[in-house]
Amino acid sequence: MTDLNTFTQGPDEHGHFGLYGGRFVAETLMPLILELDKNYQAAKTDPAFAAELDDYLKHYVGRPSPLYLAERLTEHLGGAKIYLKRDELNHTGAHKINNCIGQILLAKRMGKTRIIAETGAGQHGVATATVAARFDFPCVIYMGEVDIERQKPNVFRMKLLGAQVRPVTSGTRTLKDAMNEALRDWVTNVADTFYIIGTVAGPHPYPAMVRDFQSVIGRETNQQMLDREGRLPDTLIACIGGGSNAIGLFYPFLNHDSVILVGVEAAGKGLDTDQHAASLARGSAGVLHGNRTYLLQDEDGQIADAHSISAGLDYPGIGPEHAWLKDSGRVEYVAATDDEALEAFQLCCRLEGIIPALEPSHALAEVIKRAPHLPKDHIIVMNMCGRGDKDIFTVADVLGVTL
Amino acid sequence: MMARAMARIDRRFAELSAQNKAALVTFVTAGDPSFDVSLEIVKGLPKAGADLIELGMPFSDPMADGPSIQASSQRALKAGASMIKTLDLVTSFRKQDQETPIVCMGYYNPIYVYGVENFLADALAAGIDGLIIVDLPPEEDDELCLPALAAGLNFVRLATPTTDDQRLPAVLNNASGFVYYVSITGITGTQEADAQAIAPEIARIKHHTDLPVCVGFGIKTADHAAAVARISDGVVVGSAIVDQIAQNLDDEGRPKPNVAPAVFRFVQHLATGVLRGRSKAAE
């Protein structure tokens, strides 16, 4: 990791992205994580595994997802040319399925017989329940009580798919506590259980493995951009909770210096309040959930509550590779508030006939800030990483509409 | 100071071994249910029968702990616990007790944020003898284990049912004080460990180390403590002790006057179990 001419060599064999990453887990889990790493490394170089993965991505997920020129949005903002990478059109409605297909194939290959996962917005839970149904695994999803309340449609979808949704009542009853509970399950059921982590966090090899599975987003974007425009895009913009859709889009472009990469955190009610989820903007280095990264925490090292209108961004940490990319300066990290995201959400509905999820609405808020000041030949690609069907109740509530 | 910290645990196990006794290691969380009551409890534990004190450093996200110790950590934090106050508590304890070893258990983040070097210096000054850090496996020894050993603090290692023979040497390398055998796969305080199943595991660990081996996770009663004392060098009880605290709070979560006596009675009961285990073994 000392060679700064390349941003794509990490992590090292111990899972470190510079200072960040690592394997901070209980001894009980350590042998499992080493076994997972060994199996993932073998699968990664096995053409049969790649062929099977590609087949499911094409015929089950519906990839490649379109790269769509948002003409009315471009015209409305009057500056840069805006493309949307339509990962919200994937089966199950978000990018999460890209990773779940990869991990379930690995679980099958390792002879595991039970699947667990954590979920915040419920998109990862739905994607996990989906692949568990498709590949015939019993599946338990941990979800904070608060998130169960604000994402009811996804809870029902998971149940329809045959998963057991276990409400998490400890701590803040959101995503971080769901992850604690999933880790507690895993440490108890070590022999048969495969833990499908939904973002680029957790102990090594998860951050690298999830990134690799999500990189299909960036690889397609690269090819589609060459086909459409004959060149690389100028700016890529993606929202960041744990950071899996963003790293998936950015990763194939990290070594292309000309491409500006922008990650958008959730500023909640404002970065200067105590209600946001911007761990890069306002956090500090710490160790949680198996890795060292930027965390929202107090001076005693106790993890702070995150807040975002979007359940999927409501996490007090961030993937370790993003922490490293921030320090190295390769990626620019900004933030959008709940209000800015809501405004972007409504604009997208009206101008493009696309109801975005609240998560990418944060990325769209940054597009709205940036595009008017850029020339018309500047190309922005924004990752539309999820659709907003799940969020209409939350939005209606904030807008004072009774459904 | 350094030599004393390393020596206190070794000396305690040597004394117990000479008397054919197993150690009773009692866990409580620093600051649960309040600083004052917690200090009262910790100060009274040796007299109640604790041979070593395992002191929990509260953390907001205790991933390896079950509901009892999670709740204990939350109570302490709500009552204003912090790393500085945990160190203060040990300092106060040491004014009256120079002999009972204190091993601090917790998660790495509060230590990392405190600063490893500062923490080790302050821990030694307070009179802490060893550390058990749940989320620092041997793969991360550079973080705290090696600096702690260099500073003169014991680093107590956790071995688990998933630690196979191939991995055991790596786990025991750099271990000191004692080895903590986690008797179940799971979180603290949830399942009951079967003493019959533990015995061969202890033999397996002892094949690789001369350190005392203590057993914890899932020991709740005096009978169970007796069974484990028979086959190991020490018995760790945590969840069942902090449950005594939970059961003696009023409706608003404030400690009732009888909290500490309730804890002491329970620890005395456990201590008789630990003694009984060995007297039967001697028969």
Image: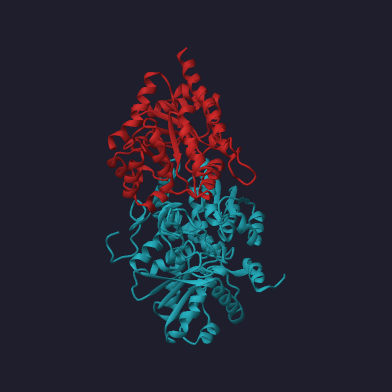
Write down the colour of chain B: red
Quarter-of-image position of residue A224: bottom left
Whether residue B65 is visible here, answered yes or no, is: yes
Write down the colour of chain A: cyan
Question: B79 or B26: which is nearer to us?
Answer: B79
Q: Quadrant of the C terminus of chain A?
A: bottom right
Q: Left of B204 or right of it: where is A177? A: right
Residue A69 placement (x, y as % from top left): 51, 80
- In the rendered view, tell whether residue A76 sits above or below residue A219: below
Q: Residue at x 41, y 48 (%)?
A: B84
Residue A207 placement (x, y as % from top left): 43, 57
Quarter-of-image position of residue B135: top left
Question: A77 or A231: which is nearer to us?
Answer: A77
- In the rendered view, tell whether residue A211 sits above or below residue A381: above
Q: How many marks?
A: 0
Residue B40 placement (x, y as % from top left): 49, 37
Q: Residue at x 63, y 60 (%)?
A: A154
Q: Left of A163 or right of it: where is A337? A: left
Q: Residue at x 52, y 67 (%)?
A: A63
Whether residue B209 is visible here, answered yes or no, is: no
The colouring scheme, among rainbow, by chain, secondary structure or one colour, is by chain
Quarter-of-image position of residue B212: top left
Question: B152 or B141: which is nearer to us?
Answer: B152
Residue B174 placement (x, y as % from top left): 31, 38
